[in-house]
Amino acid sequence: MKKLIIVESPSKAKTISGFLDKKEYDVVASFGHLRDLPKHSLGIDIDKNFDPKYSISRENSKKVKELKEKAKNKEIILATDEDREGEAIAWHLAHILNLENNTQRIVFHEITSDAIQTALQNPREINMDLVNAQQARRILDRLVGYKLSPFLWKKLLKGLSAGRVQTPALKLIYLREQEIKNFNPETYYSIKGIFEKDCQGDLTKINNKTFNKFDIKEDEVNQIKQNLNNKTVIVESVNIKEQKKHPLPPFITSTLQQSAFSLFNFSSKKTMLIAQKLYEGKDINKKRIGLITYMRTDSLNIAAKAISEARSFLKENYPKELPDKPNLYKTKSNTAQEAHEAIRPTNPLLTPNSIKEYLTSDEYKLYSLIWNRFIASQMTPATLLKQSIIFTSQDTIDSYTFQNTYQKITNLGFLKVLPVQTKDENHKDIQEKDILKINDIQTDKHLTEPPARYNDASLIKTLEQYGIGRPSTYASILSVLTDRGYVEYKQGSKGMFLTDIGEKTAELLINNFTTVSDLKLTEQIENQLDTIAKGKLEYKETIKNFYDPFIKNLEEKEKTVEKIKLIKEEKTDKLCPNCNANLIIKMSRFGKFLACPNFPKCKYTETIIDEKNAIDCPKCKKGKIIKRKTKKGKVFYGCTNYPNCDFIINTKPLKDKCPLCSYPLTKQKTKYKCTNKECKYEQPIKTNKQ
């Protein structure tokens, strides 16, 4: 009997198919979840112990019919991802295809021939503990979303949403915004001595006492400069110490997302989409192979075979940087799924440069990042020789101590592959008791700065620290915050800015729903989901313990919380073109707009235009080019004369005009480009180096 292997995506199916005998196996894709909670109703019977009511949507019914047809007279093998979501997809497929009593489930962490063959030789049953953990998360999220979102519509604004995990994430951003608003800068001074023999040091002690940076005032700074004018320092001590700089462990989901954002400005969503393509397979030398292991993981485990292959590669290419024993890394998180591996290349011999021609620019960047980090993790540490020098003033009213450390790299070690930023300086040719003339005393006035706004990298790191979310959810948490219009990114800044709607939503939720917004409670629920996945907790118990106090509180707040007026609906002098009524200013989750007061009889609306900054539309010559958002919150720029004018671009237009066609230019990474699709004008952006 022929065998049918079912996976989630066509790309994954194509890669796996290339490793198998087509006479024996067919490989098809389910395209993710075919059965789920219904889209337009709660789908959970609260009175019957939170029983979920799964259904097949209309758009999926055709796929189900096709899949059932392909499954006829075949032995079915379910090969979805080995995580909770993948296990749940396999379970739903088993129900759809009536496989409950005859289920073959295979799992693997990389899509390679060896991994697939090993998996086929070791089928198992569906892990219901993982399925129940996924069900618990899905039901909890549905209950919060369906019960709490209508409350926001009633009390604040229609179209808003609240989520079990997005709410604490929004709270973190809100609290940071409050810190920034309430921040009062303080003045402090830094004092540096510049000495003979190209030496310098920071002032660290006065009269052998370490001082607080806020202790020294401006008049004291001037006095210190006077006291040290034309004086000398004696070299009190010179200590040279060897230090090892150890390689970082291979990536897990959170650290990959953080690094990709910091280095390439990739959003977490973009990082995961690229990683998914690398995992599912690329055509290399006319052969399709998976290039990295599974990218949703919080484990630092590495398969013995992968370590052996990495060491063989290092022995051939970096023999001096090969340690005597493999480097092993311990996962810090108590909840990490240790059966998984860290993110690594499936074959260390496939160096980034050797396969560059087969990858897109972004795929090459991410693969290089993963490959370099993994190979470096199995190399020797870098060796640093640190020269620490203490200088003390001579013949001064008060005693002043200066200190500095010069760092020299004596052995690159893993830095040959992963050149992380490391100071490399020459040591100073001085000895203890040397007397050096003070050439200058440099003083700088500083103001303390407010905490930085969260960006993709720092928010993911904080979510991980609080135990909020898991590897599979970080990207979706961040996406929903922007899609709902709660946060936005401003040009020239990587930080997340809380919108007016985001601020009001956060305040309403934080002040009234501690069960949803409490960071520690969110962590506790995540830990309970992990416990369910280990088979040590009944999943409906977790749902009930959360839901009962949550719904009781919601019912109380429905009665006591007043509707919040976002803005005063002011009349304007502008008239509605349809019914001649004075338009009024209203608020949506995407910002202020003009609307007809005769709604719903008249549904005319108009975007409020900032006349100072708006650019004339180059196409119709009548409208203005303004910033807009799609229903999902994605920013674009279009003409106010829409639908009569369809001018639209995805990047912000500049006031500078194209010298060929007079359309506005737009700034891209390395060039200025014309917004006219029919005009090919572009100009490189000049840098300081040029």
Image: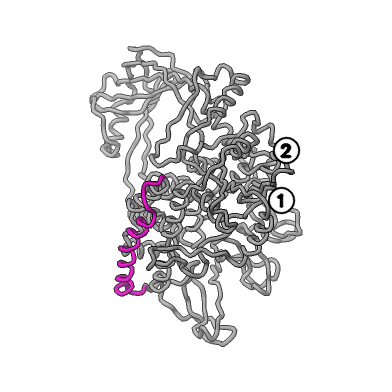
Q: Decide: marks 2, 1 in contact (CB < 8 A)?
A: no
Q: Is residue 542 magenta?
A: yes
Whether 8 is drawn above or below 567: the answer is above
> Which sits in the foreground, 298 or 376?
298
Identity of the residue drawn at 23% across and 28% down: 209
Residue 350 at what x, y percent from top left? 65, 31
Quadrant of res 306: top right
The residue labelled by disc 1 is 682
The residue labelled by disc 2 is 287
Q: Amino acid at mark 1?
A: Glu
Q: SS for tag 1?
A: strand
Residue 15 at what x, y percent from top left? 67, 43
Q: SS for tag 2?
A: strand
Identity of the residue drawn at 30% across and 35% down: 221
> Which sits in the foreground, 378 or 120?
120
Identity of the residue drawn at 48% across and 38% down: 339
Q: Which residues are magenta?
A: 534-563
Residue 374 at what x, y percent from top left? 54, 31
Q: Earlier in the sequence, mark 2 or mark 1?
A: 2
The secondary structure that dominates the magenta segment is helix
Nearest to viewer (mark 2 / mark 1): 2
Q: CA distance from mark 2 to mark 1?
A: 37 Å
Question: Quick one: label 1, few (<14), some, or many (20+) residues within 10 Å?
Answer: some
